[in-house]
Amino acid sequence: MKSLLLSLRARLGWLIVVTLILLAAGGYAFYQRDQAERARQAALASLRTEVIARGDLVSLVSATGSLLPEQQSSPSFLVPGVVEEVLVASGETVRAGQALARLDDADLQLAVRQAEDALAIARLNRQKLLAGPAEGDLAAAEANVKSANAAVNDLLKGVGEEQVSIARIKYDNVRQDYQQATDRYHSAVEFAKEYPRFAPSQATLDSLKAAMENAFYAAEIARLQWEQAKRGADQGSLSVGYARVAQSRAALAQLQAPPAELQIRQADLAVEQAQSALDQAKLRAAHAQLVAPFDGVVAAIHVKAGERVGSAVPAFMLVDLSHFHLDVSVDEVDVAKLTVGQAAGITLDALPGVGVAGRVERLAPAAAIVGGVVNYTVRIRFDATTAPLRSGMSATAQITVAEAEEALLVPNWAIRRDRRTGQAYTSLKDGDELKEVPIVTGLRGETHTEVKDGVSEGEVAAVSTAREGLNIFGGQ
């Protein structure tokens, strides 16, 4: 009996042990299933998903810059001088051609009048040359020929006391004329040295000098005639008489001959030179007034009345605020996508919520390398707007470079590109699992990419947030 009880106790112990083992195994299996379900639920909860659908896609190139006015200029006087008057105020709106300031132009106007006088003299000299000798000049030359012939005849007949006295009187008169011509010439020269601003023209001085020289030669001829009269008709006197006859005849022939081509050309050149000098004098006088080169606003004034200014020194700052443009720098990768005429949307830091439209107007042909980065300047012309734009405002331009309508769109975060092969893949949700499929991409936007082949509308793009954190599917 005792052994039976011991046997029953032993069997009961083993039964308890087996039961406990079975209970432990069942509990562990249940725990494993629960943990697996919890992990599956956590994995599903960590997925980032989006249903692949069709839509419109816009590809943009973004760049920043500052607003610039349509035109900006710093006009300056082209001649130095003293500012006589400033005619505008800072901030004033001016029209193209409107006077901004004037210099004291007294000296410039005097130069214009002197140039006008010189031109008038040159024209008169040319007119006189083409018109030929005056009747009085011809009569005088003919009279000189007759007088010379008569003098030779008198020498041949013999000279009396009366002829000697007449020759002496004639010599005294001609010598007095020579002295007066000399005084007039030297007085003009001295006046020109002392008062150069009011000096007679060079043509006037040349004319006075020629008159003096002619008077000198006339006085010498009269002296020789007087000497001849005193000596009588010797061979030397006759030679002088015949020489005077030849000279008077040559002078008469010169007056009667038409002007030579060279003389006409010289006269023409003298007129052209005088006209050119007058044009230059008028131009310099006109430069004493500074005018606005275009319609605009006076942004700054750098001169004041009474001060001396040099040429080419900026006197004003003038800006045209009727239109604005934006110059932005675009890198060499994005600039290849741009063409003239592309639309751009512009936002301004100073005007939040205000959008302005524009278009690409110009692409720089040459690059500007800054810090080793190759950039190109792109100009964007603003469309008409009522926005209160101001020069210097910071702006961002979004240039539309391409558009796709009703494209199959996959989010960029669900796309990976193999750097070795260039093949693009997207991650899709297949039941409770993720799978990667190869795709053919098209236009890429800021958030989505057009997919031309590899996925279908309605499929779900998905990535695990843990994997996304590793940047496996972060973009192309």
Image: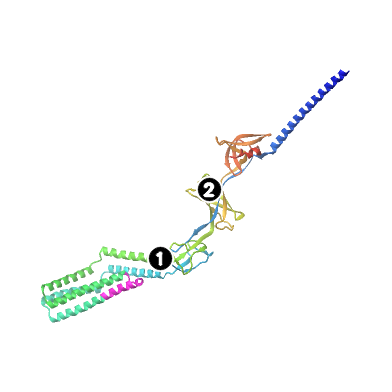
- Secondary structure category for the residue under label 1: helix
Say if residue 134 shows up in the picture: no
For residue 129: magenta?
Answer: no
Q: In which quarter of the image is the C terminus?
A: top right
Q: Is the magenta stretch mostly helix, strand or loop?
A: helix
From what the image shows, is residue 2 above or below residue 421?
above
Read off the residue under disc 2. Answer: 330
> Quadrant location of the N terminus?
top right
Which quadrant of the figure has residue 174?
bottom left
Q: Position of residue 463 (x, y in %)?
A: 65, 38
Q: Which residue is drawn at 66% across and 36% down?
A: 429
Left or right side of 129 for 277 = right
First of labels 2, 1 by sequence position: 1
Coordinates of residue 91 in the picture (x, y in percent): 54, 64
Q: Which sits in the foreground, 189 or 337? A: 189
Q: Nearer the viewer, residue 225 or 82?
A: 82
Query: What label sits on residue 83 in the rendered view?
Result: none
Amino acid type, residue under disc 2 in the picture: Val
Percent position (x, y) of residue 466? Answer: 65, 38
The label shown at residue 284 is 1
Magenta range is 182-201
In this picture, is 368 found above or below 426?
A: below
Q: Which of 82 and 139 is in front in this view?
A: 82
Residue 263 % position (x, y): 27, 65
Place residue 126 in its image quadrant: bottom left
For label 2, the crowd category at 10 Å Cα-Cα, with few meaning under 14, some 14 to 19 and many 20 or more, is many
Question: From what the image shows, is residue 113 above or below residue 3?
Answer: below
What is the distance, in whole Å, between disc 2 and disc 1 at their CAs? Answer: 46 Å
Q: What residue type is labelled 1?
A: Arg
Answer left or right for 265 relative to 253.
right
